[in-house]
Image (cartoon, rainbow, N blue to C red):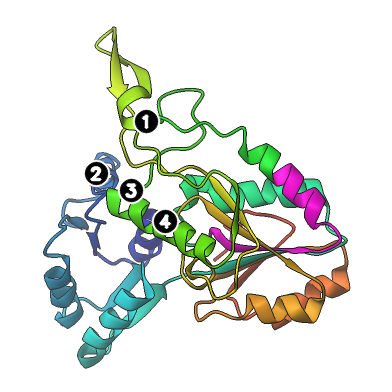
Amino acid sequence: MGTRKLGPALAAGCTVVVKSAGETPFTANALAVLGERAGIPKGVINIVTALENTPRIGLALCESNVVRKISFTGSTRVGKLLMRQSSDTLKKMSLELGGNAPFIVFEDADIDVAVSSAIGSKFKSSGQTCVCSNRIMVHSSVYDEFMRRFKEAVSTFVLGHGDNDRTTHGPLISPAAVARVHSLVEDSVQRGATIEFGGRKRPDLGKSALAMLLHEDRLINVPAGPNFFEPTILSNVSSDSRVCKEEIFGPVAPVSVFHTEEAVLSMANDCDVGLAAYIFTQDVNRATRVTEQLHFGMVALNTGIISDAALP
């Protein structure tokens, strides 16, 4: 996130203040140090780290007459707040806010591609990215085959410490994130959903899962930590479940069935945050037609990765 915003600003000749996420400040700090080593003068990239007083810092940046533009990636709630606070100074703003990405698999899709793409789109960073697929929708004629292969793939995941070579997925960002994801699954089950795979918090990993790290030429044991939630697949998910209405930001994949193109377009567009969407079909006409009718800023065709460094 930091490099995406820093690059254009520095290229335009601007100095920058980066307010890093309070839970994960160290990467931004390292970036500033590396920038100085590369020749960027001190004071061109400035890092502010904070957690509890983040709202006060945000207000100061928004109300400042020196700051000319704010670029923010985060929740829709905070984005609206920043826009209100920046109104008196008429700042330029770039806001990348909440997402609720539909992942649509039509009957003519390449199932191998769809499954591998669903794995990458849903479970990268344990589901903690703004463009992660949030709702997986599969045509009735290929639903059983897709679900079978999807469960097989997810069953190979290994939770654990990032320095363990066997690990495929790590923890969520905080205990609060684990509790929220757990509540989304519980709400879905109460509304009739079926847990096809996973569905549990894994506090035991904090006690038993150890990774071997090389430290000063000797091996040490490092606990993996407590903030784990199992990769989870849900079926028969009600459209009014929280897991369909809210951004999950965790390793939970709600899968539903559709029968017609019109129906799935209605399902996909039934949300108030249109960041990214994914469609899988081998019909070029359908791809064009559906892309134009989806109310989302980015639409990926037959891929689960929507970023491209070459795009402006």
Residue in the image at 21% along x and 55% along y:
22
Element on which disc 1 rests = helix
Element on which disc 2 rests = helix
Mark number for residue 181?
A: 4
**How busy is the neighbourhood of tag 3: few (under 14 within 10 Å), some, or many (20 plus)?**
some
**Position in image of residue 41 (x %, y %):** 20, 51
- Pointer 1 and pointer 3: residues touching (CB < 8 Å)? no
**Position in image of residue 282 (x %, y %):** 86, 61
Of the residues under marks 4 and 3, which one precedes in the sequence? Answer: 3
Of the residues under marks 1 and 2, which one precedes in the sequence? Answer: 2
Can you identify the residue that label 2 sits on? Answer: 26
**How busy is the neighbourhood of tag 4: few (under 14 within 10 Å), some, or many (20 plus)?**
many
Can you identify the residue that label 3 sits on? Answer: 173
* 262 or 15: nearer the viewer: 262
* Amino acid at pointer 4: Val
The residue segment tinted magenta is 132-150
Of the residues under marks 4 and 2, which one precedes in the sequence? Answer: 2
**Position in image of residue 310 (x %, y %):** 58, 57
Q: Is residue 101 above or below residue 209?
A: below
Mark number for residue 205?
A: 1
Does 283 lie within the magenta span? no
* Amino acid at pointer 3: Ile
Mark number for residue 279?
A: none
